[in-house]
Amino acid sequence: MPVNLKGRSFLTLMDFTPEEIRYLLDLSHDLKAKKRSGIVGDTLRGKNVVLLFEKTSTRTRCAFETAIHDEGGQVTYLDAGSSQMGKKESLEDTAKVLGRFFDGIEYRGFEQRVVEDLAKYSGVSVFNGLTDVDHPTQILADMMTMEEHIAKPLRQCKVVFVGDIRNNMCYAWMYGCAKMGMTFVGYGPQELIAQVDQTVLDKANAVSAQTGASISLSSDPDCLKGADVLYSDIWASMGEEDQIPERVRMLTPYRIDEAMLEATGNPDVKFMHCLPSFHDFETKMAKSQMELGYDIREVTDEVFRGSHSIVFDEAENRMHTIKAVLVAMIGR
């Protein structure tokens, strides 16, 4: 059956069927090939998209802006200080106004409710650039990257997310693996397993029952065996400095190193990361914390820069997959 996503919003992969996600991945591969061949697109000509960023980003902003420009569209960027949303104007009113100006709205911030309300009230397609509980554009890029580097179908792949298994990336991976019939393991300390949002886990397991996926959480290193991907994220973000001592205590045993790669038993295992990453001490935050006695690296520099790492292909694919979402939902 033909897939038609025109007018849809991209809030979470849970809103899409496996066939629709497959369509977006195929379109992503096609658009990447066209860009590399120098073929200029115009599917967004005459379209205007606003980017609402309550949280800063390098990859998400650049991926959206480049994708829109590549296809002939126009983009407006508003950060938290450039909009009255939630301050002098309600979210509902802001959404209704932006819906009159723009063909699409991207939101990157905190509460999932905000991106859902933007879609509810704006009357145009809305795209989730990250919330506290989900990051669907990242997962789409990750799956595309896996298809480029792993010579078997996604449904035969095993992803192990290592470290802070309560965060939005881990939850987004649960959703993505559930939808595509994949094997997912969240590998982290037992005290964090106990804090995982049960609603997220229940949703993922309900979908898995239909797709044949496997979603589990473990603190046993045996769960690493057979992994095709070891995936990690930073342990603490800017503004969470007060939590660093406790995070380092809990998560240091889960730093991805060569020994952990070997523990998978897969010589072709890939290392992936949504970025930015603390893998050395060349950032202000990593350096200052090390001076205080806290090594906040979630992965060693040897792994990050080594032959198993595909993080920069992954980062590039944010642009191609975001372009696919835009073209599919608001393209001409």
Image (cartoon, grey):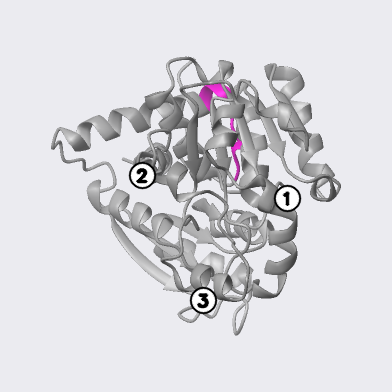
Tell me, yes or no, if residue 8 can be seen here.
no
Q: Circle 2 sits in a helix, a strand or a loop, which is it?
A: helix
**Image position, residue 99 (x, y; %):** 48, 61
Between marks 1 and 2, how big is the CA–CA gap? 25 Å
Q: Nearer the viewer, mark 1 or mark 3?
A: 1
Q: Circle 1 sits in a helix, a strand or a loop, which is it?
A: loop
Q: Earlier in the sequence, mark 1 or mark 3?
A: 3
Residue at position x 57%, y 50% in the image: 233
Q: Earlier in the sequence, mark 1 or mark 2?
A: 1
Residue located farthest toward the bottom when viewing the structure as drawn: 88
Residue at position x 57%, y 45% in the image: 232
Residue stretch in magenta: 12-20
Q: Which residue is mark 1?
A: 166
Q: Are marks 2 and 3 in contact (CB under 8 Å)?
A: no
Residue 15 in magenta?
Answer: yes
User: With respect to residue 140, does 304 lie above or below?
Assistant: below
Specify whether 156 is left or right of 331.
right
Density class for disc 3 (Cα within 10 Å; few <14, some 14-19, many ≥20) is some
Q: Which mark is residue 312?
A: 2
Density class for disc 2 (Cα within 10 Å; few <14, some 14-19, many ≥20) is few
Q: Circle 3 sits in a helix, a strand or a loop, which is it?
A: loop
Q: Earlier in the sequence, mark 2 or mark 3?
A: 3
Nearer to me, 139 or 210: 139
Nearer to me, 172 or 46: 172
Between marks 1 and 3, how big is the CA–CA gap? 26 Å
Q: Amino acid at mark 3?
A: Ala
**Image position, residue 71 (x, y; %):** 25, 46
Q: Which residue is mark 3?
A: 80
Picture quarter with the C terminus: top left
Nearer to me, 311 or 264: 264
